[in-house]
Amino acid sequence: MISYLGILVGLEAFSYWAVRTLRKDFQWLITPKDELPDFDKEGLKKFIEHGYDPELGWVRKPNTEKEEIGKLGKTKYHIDKNGARKNQGHESLPKIISCYGDSFTFARQVNDNETWEWCLSELTRSDVANFGVGNYGLDQSLLRLKREYPKNKTDVVIMGIVPSTIVRVLDVWKHYNEFGNIFGFKPRFKLEDGKLKLIKNIIDREDKFLEYQKYLPQIQEHDYFYRTKFKKEMLRFPYSYHILKNPSRNIPLLSLIAWYKWFGKDDQKVYPAPMKIIMDVNLKLRVRLFKEEHATSLLEKLVEEFKDYGREQGFTPVFLLMPQKDDILFIKHQKKLYYGAFIKRISDKITVIDLTDHLIDRKDLDDLYSDDNKYGGHYNLLGNKVVADFVYNSLKQNGILR
């Protein structure tokens, strides 16, 4: 009995030490300390200056620029005075198409003249406006459309999103789903009696960041992931129990982080193998949510709101689905389109351009992305040309372009 108790105490002590030691090197290991993370004042100052938006949570601010690094080296983007990405060489052409959505719409990790909107501008001989913003859900994209469209009217509006949008429309603090993204407060919609109800961004003033703890009850009430993911994946006392509660995630994760920490190269700052586990967990989450009525009904209602806004404003709405590389690989392996039922539901209501089948059939899939990992990063220049060609042909086939 004494030896058995000693083994349990030893296991708990080792588990506590391992979690506390490795947590410093990997933000996806969370402990009770992450319930109330400290806000770095300098980091917060930069975020407020360069990205914060009281209504939307964050946005690309007018007249700004930034460099990024992908497998092909440095790239740079510029935001014009209207808050859209610069579309160099097309500024004097007619504006007939505008695009809203997430980072795949913004086209991260390529230069301004390598986005799919730039390529689509070449094909249409027009100035395609790009109002995409990284990590946006359909909810934020819709709110931004309603804010920007009256000042930037076009005949066609493309709403471009990745399947992960079904996750993004369920949170109000990104930290509860993307652990460590502590500045990412946002609005969301909820369904009440079949109608959309807007939950405005709770941290809608700069001073609220420094007293965010006062608003946690309200934030936790409206964030789907606080209890279903954040609390569930938190490693806390008894540590050995919570590690073994989810062994397929925690044991490989701890082992790989330890290996990279003590045996990896000194200059290696990225953890590709541990991040693969996180990406797989995230993929399983969106696969599950596309089977749950509360999530798909909300997403469908947001699509309907996009369609209704198009009717109200007099533009043709187009819903563009751009799967990530790991979505394509999963679908090829499972031989099942996990969001197929949802696409079928909305196809009766709005013009849908789904890139999935087109990408699955391509033998050069790896050549279309900006990184070499399973996630793939964003589309590179070749990938964006493929997207532009497919979108252009689809718009013509649907009679939207002539």
Image: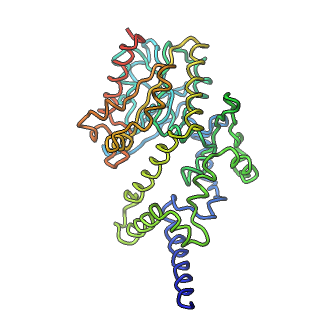
Q: Residue at x 36, y 32 (%)?
A: 356
Query: Extreme left residue here?
Result: 363
Left or right of residue 342: residue 1? right
Rendered view: 383 above or below 92: below
Please state which of residues 191 and 377 is positioned toward the viewer in this rendering.
191
Please state which of residues 378 and 324 is positioned toward the viewer in this rendering.
324
Q: What is the quadrant of the C terminus in the image? A: top left
Q: What is the quadrant of the N terminus in the image? A: bottom right
User: Looking at the picture, how far across and down is residue 32, in whole percent?
Assistant: 63, 64
Q: Residue at x 31, y 47 (%)?
A: 372
Q: Quadrant of residue 5?
A: bottom right
Q: Residue at x 61, y 17 (%)?
A: 150
Rendered view: 257 above or below 398: below
Query: Extreme top residue here?
Result: 402
Q: Quadrant of residue 206?
A: top right
Q: Quadrant of residue 260?
A: bottom left
User: Looking at the picture, how far across and down is residue 93, in whole percent?
Assistant: 42, 13
Left or right of residue 66: residue 381? left
Please state which of residues 330 and 274 is positioned toward the viewer in this rendering.
330
Left or right of residue 326: residue 56? right
Q: Residue at x 52, y 42 (%)?
A: 289
